[in-house]
Amino acid sequence: MLRHEKIFDQTEKYGLGYFYQMVKSAQQQQERTIMLTRSEAIALKAVPSHDLEKYSEHASKVRDAHWGKTLTYSRKVFVPLTNMCRDECGYCTFVKKPGSPDARIMTPDEVMTVVREGERLGCKEVLFSLGEKPEQRYPEAKEALERLGHTSMIEYLIEMCQRVLEETSLLPHVNAGTLTDEEIARLKPVSVSMGMMLENISRRLLQRGEAHYACPDKVPVQRLRTLERAGRHGVPFTTGILIGIGETWEERVDSLLAINAQHRHYGHVQEVIVQNFRAKPGTAMANHPEPDLEDMVRTLILARLLLHPSISLQAPPNLESRFPSYISAGINDWGGISPLTIDHINPERAWPQIDALREATAKCGYGLEERLAIYPRYLQSPEHFITSPLAARLDEISREDGLALQQCG
């Protein structure tokens, strides 16, 4: 523990180059499992379009060898506990400032109404998504939390996760951004998994005019620190990169390598999402060009061939309708899909119907199965990754292979 704290202290002092020096040292002590070196990964950017198919075939083979001929998804409800946030990302429409009629913190009754309706529709995951630390910037958010009996959003989140577990059959997955050691330790007993998009490790994107300007929680070392803390606490974790926000190809490569290095040490990264930027009216990046399909496919191939094959590779199906291109690039998961709630991060992009997604997946030669918010391999090591009450709940709703048990009737 002290060793890792020292690494991050030195990283803050000397920059991310120090972190990667540590990563390289750790990798040299282990059997090489990544399929591309950094130089090979960077060179993939220059591969002509007509030569990309052989890399796609290789990515598919890697996926098939580890994940078989089945793709997965999680049936969820999306609960935006608050849409206030102290960050101001240049591409975000989710966040609302106090004073806006849409700015809010959901009440417990509002949360449980959504969760119970999701339960009625057969959902098994509650995705709690919330802006980061609004109470540290806005007096209005702090006062609203005080009226609910809390001093922080994380305290309130813990209460609502506990209510979900006590009053329904669903499992909380929390996406609360950067977290301290204490916060992760308190959230673990009431959430089956956690998540936070790394997005990118580039400090350049924090500069004025860039995507993460005025975003204290998007400082790369802080997000890497959260990812590392989750590993030490044995938390199955979802992370990923957001492409097309002004980063270079090399920065994409290094972001994936940073995730992979954490997973090689702790084995806790259950999935990586490759998400494509979508321009939205009213944002600072409303006129910023979006990555095209080839860029997305090339990045998915990169991720599949760079990451350890035990990491699930996901691409959101509501941000691109050409499913065969994603499947051929090596993905094995479609992420959370809701029969009830919209994607509050991308509200203009409707979820595909599960039956339609199943049909499209089948046309590519793959089955589609429902998974839980925690991947099957973590059920095999419950003493490290799962607390006892959650382990009992998982036994009731999982099949022998660890995927979701389908309810009768």
Image (tube, helix red, strand yellow):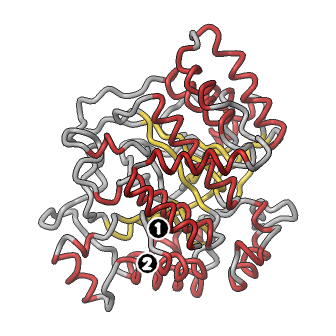
Taking 76 as reference, is 18 left or right? left
Disc 2 residue type (three-letter)? Leu
Q: CA distance from mark 1 to mark 2?
A: 8 Å
Label 1 CA crowd tier, 10 Å (few <14, some 14–19, many 20+): many
| Residue 268 horizontal/vertical position (percent) | 66, 61
Going from the N terminus, do you reach mark 1 or mark 2 first?
1
The C terminus, quarter of image: bottom right
Q: Is residue 54 above or below residue 394?
A: above
| Residue 54 horizontal/vertical position (percent) | 72, 16
Residue 282 in sight from this viewpoint: no
Q: Secondary structure at mark 1?
A: strand
Q: Which residue occupies the extreme right position in the image?
A: 400
Label 2 CA crowd tier, 10 Å (few <14, some 14–19, many 20+): many
Q: Is residue 397 above or below residue 222?
A: below
Q: Which residue occupies the extreme left position in the image?
A: 99
Taking 61 as reference, is 274 left or right? left
Q: Residue 157 got which mark? A: 2
Name the residue carrying label 1: 128
- Residue drawn at 68 percent across, 33 percent down: 305
Given residues 246 and 288, the one toward you in this image is: 246
Disc 1 residue type (three-letter)? Phe
Q: Which residue occupies the extreme bottom position in the image?
A: 149
Residue 185 in sight from this viewpoint: yes
- Residue drawn at 53 percent across, 40 percent down: 274
Q: Secondary structure at mark 2?
A: helix
- Residue drawn at 69 percent across, 46 percent down: 27
Tell me whether circle 1 and circle 2 mark residues in contact (CB < 8 Å). Answer: yes
- Residue drawn at 43 percent across, 54 percent down: 342
